[in-house]
Image (cartoon, rainbow, N blue to C red):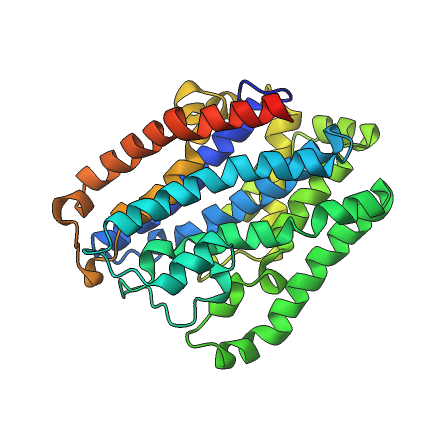
Amino acid sequence: MSSHSNYIPTLDGWRALAIALVLVQHSFISMGRDVPVLNRLGPHGVGIFFVLSGYLITSRLLQDDLNLGRFYFRRAFRILPLVVLYLAVLLALGHRLPIRAGELLSTLFFFRNFTLGAVMPANAAGWYTLHFWSLALEEQFYLLWPWLLVALSIRKARLVALSGAAAVALWRVLCGPLATHIYNFSRAWYMRPEFHADGLLIGCALALWLTNENFALRLAKAKWLFPLSACIWITLVVVTPDFPSLLESVAAAGMIAGTMSQPGSNIAPLLESSPLRGIGRISYGLYVWQQLFLVPRAAGHPLGILQSFPLNLALIFAVSFASYRLVERPLLNFAHGRS
């Protein structure tokens, strides 16, 4: 939020690029277009969001002297209002949408990532809350990580973040094939925190390492950091079937760090441009509302023209902007003023 301290405009640009990847994938799915690379961009966008989230949450906790009460108070006002509003809209449209009580409850109480077994991407059942798996995973992660920061020194927290990310990635490789047989459809297990927390931990590690002035200065001089990280990230996005790897999360952290530490680089002005910053500010709303309008074509469009291209895209931006101005920003300003 630009109205709050320690605002880094570059990060809004990264949010905009991340949500763009999600919107591109879901747009092609809603139109029934099969473009292999484009149809799997969404998870890579979410991967960038996870690295950003880990970085921002850890940075803010450190800036607030690990004040957990303030952290959870602000987090509640950041996340809950839009979740409740979205679910209220789903309930209001319940006579037209295939919404089930179980998915609403798992969304509201942030365990949607544990209830994905019966959800198929081509089936409308469960689609309208499917995207809350990522938000649930984040909230589960933040029930633990802030307390670890309080208990550990910065040096130990860095080690825990890096070793934890490596352990999650290794666990995913070793146990993923077995988990595929346990859950109802392939890769549902991937949305569980023990299989997917490495991106968040890499973002946390970046924030912790940037508290070291020598490390931050070296990053500022590393002109190769962004181009190398970008080449690795793009390569992995093209060749990876669906979900980000640990190396991709590291590459995303490298891209983000490169643009933050080198504001004069070629990419930084683009990320800090007004259009991208504006999209970045409403990216949370875009992520939440897009699922209502971008529905798999095979599942039908129960809301008719509202879910048809290009009106659906226009509505996503209009509703997201309205919810940001009328709900998100006022409540965030209240939370920051009271905490």
Residue 235 seen in the figure? no
Above or below: residue 140 compared with residue 71: below
Q: Position of residue 190 (x, y in %)?
A: 52, 65
Q: Position of residue 103 (x, y in %)?
A: 39, 61
Q: Position of residue 137 (x, y in %)?
A: 55, 55
Determine the residue positioned at 70% across, 31% down: 222
Residue 120 seen in the figure? yes
Q: Which quarter of the image is occupied by the C terminus?
A: top right
Farthest-out residue, left = 305
The number of numbered badges drawn on the structure is 0
Determine the residue positioned at 45% across, 38% down: 81
Determine the residue positioned at 66% across, 51% down: 143
> In this orientation, which residue lies closer to the viewer: 298 or 66?
66
> In this orientation, which residue lies closer to the viewer: 298 or 244?
298
> In this orientation, which residue lies closer to the viewer: 228 or 305?
305
> In this orientation, which residue lies closer to the viewer: 199 or 182?
182
Q: Position of residue 306 (x, y in %)?
A: 17, 43
Determine the residue positioned at 37% across, 38% down: 286
Q: Judge from the rendering whether residue 119 lies leftward or rightward of residue 300; answer left or right.
A: right
